[in-house]
Image (cartoon, helix red, strand yellow):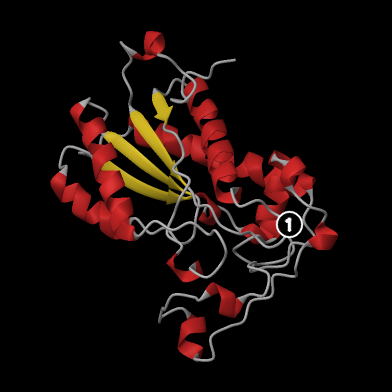
Amino acid sequence: MIRPYVLAETNWKHLKDAEIELAVLPWGATEAHNYHLPYATDNIEADAIAIEAARIAWEAGTKLIILPTLPFGVNTGQSDIFLDMNLNPSTQQAILRDLITVLDRQGVKKLLIFNSHGGNDFKTMVRELGLQFPSMFLAVSNWFRALDRNLYVEEGGDHADEVETSLLLHLRPDLVLPLTEAGDGKERKNKIKAFSEGWVWSERKWSQISADTGTGNPKKATAEKGKRYFEAVTQKFGQLFIDIAKADVNNLYE
């Protein structure tokens, strides 16, 4: 069944006279996710969460379109992890500028970047591009920060952890190896205390912090946890899509 809010699936007959209130651009990465998850984990999550949230918004009367997921992200800290594919931030900004140019020219004046990869950071890009495209409303979201993970899983982490493993067990169990084959996702912390406290930053060298490329123990993951998380996060983003689409960007503050 064609989903008219998914650009990759819909057609010119539907779109030639359409009015779009909001475009959503999922952006993922192609990288190792411990031993047990596929390289496309971030892209699978981006597709599934964005499209289901769009269904919720569409059925509530929102005119939106989900653009195809960009499958490569910033992986500069993983340059020695085999086939972790990297786009430099400057390349991302050039791609983003070209896509915004299309939307701006064609009258789609709101864009939400739907980020699915921790290494992507679009804030400075949006600041600069916002000056170049003053008629565009540009926003950035990170689905993995939208909920309190502690309400859904038992173990922490931020890469190939219990949350991501549970989501993939729900969304694509055919691509998940048995959890007996997963590493424990133990992360080595910076010896300088300030970095762990979060007020100083340097890029993590992935091969130095993790033996299995994961950060967070996935062993307690289940499809049931993934389903519960998926339903909650898509409901939250469905409402966000509605709110942005219907908002008067010249009257956002109170």
Q: Is residue 172 above or below residue 199?
A: above
Q: Position of residue 190 (x, y in %)?
A: 53, 86
The relative height of residue 210 versus residue 66 in the rendered view (above or below) is: below
**Point 46% across, 87% down: residue:** 194
Query: Mark 1 sits on what residue?
Result: 36
The residue lying at 17 percent from left, 37 percent from top is 135
Residue 139 visible in the snapshot: yes
Occupied quadrant, residue 82: bottom right
- In what element is the residue under mark 1? loop
The N terminus lies in which quarter of the figure?
top right
Closer to the camera in the image, 106 or 238: 106
User: Would you place residue 192 above or below residue 18 in this image?
Assistant: below
Residue 229, position as x, y percentages in the image: 66, 47
Residue sitting farthest toward the bottom: 192
In the displayed structure image, the side of residue 134 where residue 175 appears, left or right: right
Location of residue 125 (image quadrant):
bottom left
Identity, as a three-letter code, of the amino acid under mark 1: His
